[in-house]
Image (tube, rainbow, N blue to C red):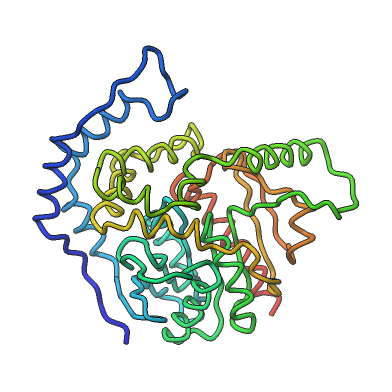
Amino acid sequence: MIKPFRINVPEADLDDLNDRLVRTRWPNEVTDAGTDYGFPLARLKELAEYWLTTYKWRDHEAKLNELPHFTTEIDGQNIHFVHVRSERPDALALILTHGWPGSFLEFLDVIEPLSRDFHLVIPSIPGYGFSGPTHERGWGIVRIAHAWAELMRRLGYEHYGAQGGDFGSGISIALGTAAPDQLVGVHVNYLPTPPDPEADFDLSASDRARLEKIKSLMANRPPFQALQALTPQTIGYALTDSPVGQLAWIAERFAQWTDPSSSISDERLLTDISLYWLTATAASAARLHHDAVRNVGPCPVPVGVAVFAHDITQSVRPLAERLYDINHWSEFERGGHFAAMEVPELFVDDVRSFFEKQTSAK
């Protein structure tokens, strides 16, 4: 059963957030620390003060409630999603999947332009936001992809496309394995391309530089990733109990993974962080790093890739082509890991261009 859903955070939860922000116990910081030791104290205090005194969740809640929200239960798990139908009767359905530490909020700026050409389904990953926490093992990329296939079946879509970044990329590709007869193509704006010792070809200088960056990241696993992959429950205690801890944990990722010229506002950042805090899903969201299985099997549908210059890594096309049927590849000098938020106009144009190729080829 699919049920309409309306966001209505209890006032007591907002009062509790404010009370905890007021009572924050701050650590000290060494002189001229910069970012050498982690997220800067002055910037975090600035964000926390804004969250406490200026940011108004109710204003954003009212705006979000203008969208059509729904929930349904799939495989024993609550699934929240936004469903926006296009006015075009022949529009292709498109399921958009976020990653960590994002949310369905990543797509707010692209809903209107994309809905001119697509019926949009924008779910919250199990364990994230209004889908609520998961309660059992195994909610990895493949299981989520099967849940998405069931969601699209329930909505009556026989053929559709998929788009994603971060974990949403892996989920969308796994959907190609789970529902190859329904999926017309997958567009991703993040595609890891690890070294392939069996690859027998020469790479360009730029691709070699990209591969060296990838090797460096693989050899020096980021601390947040190690903690969430190995002990998500342990870090979850701190993030669920301290709003400033949750604030620092996510704000640092946005600071590191976005194009320096991007204009993601503190309001948008705090709405995303508030979503994690108010739904108490820090630990369950972190569990996806633990439960995700990267080997999702072959993806028999066409794949389009958008590479943004300021993302965590940039895909190496010859390596990607060994794994997937790549029939669309774009490179952008602007934008980072949260492309739909950072450069929505580039994101929309590239998604539209890819799926126009797929539908015209039918």
Question: From the image, which quarter does the C terminus lie in?
Answer: bottom right
- The answer to whether residue 130 is left or right of residue 148 is left
Q: Is residue 315 above or below residue 74?
A: above
Residue at screen point 40% across, 61% down:
111
The image position of residue 86, as x and y in percent, is: 42, 73
Of residues 142 and 160, the one nearer the viewer is 142
The image position of residue 15, as x and y in percent, is: 10, 49
Of residues 95 and 48, the one nearer the viewer is 48
- The answer to whether residue 302 is left or right of residue 110 is right
Question: From the image, which quarter does the N terminus lie in?
Answer: bottom left
Number of numbered discs visible in the structure rendering: 0
- The answer to whether residue 16 is left or right of residue 100 is left
Residue at screen point 25% across, 77% down:
4
Quarter of the figure with residue 169: bottom right
The image position of residue 359, as x and y in percent, is: 64, 75
Quarter of the figure with residue 142: bottom right
The image position of residue 181, as x and y in percent, is: 63, 84
Q: Is residue 54 above or below residue 350?
A: above
Of residues 153 and 36, the one nearer the viewer is 36
Of residues 59 and 220, the one nearer the viewer is 220
Q: Residue furthest top?
A: 31
Quarter of the figure with residue 275: bottom left
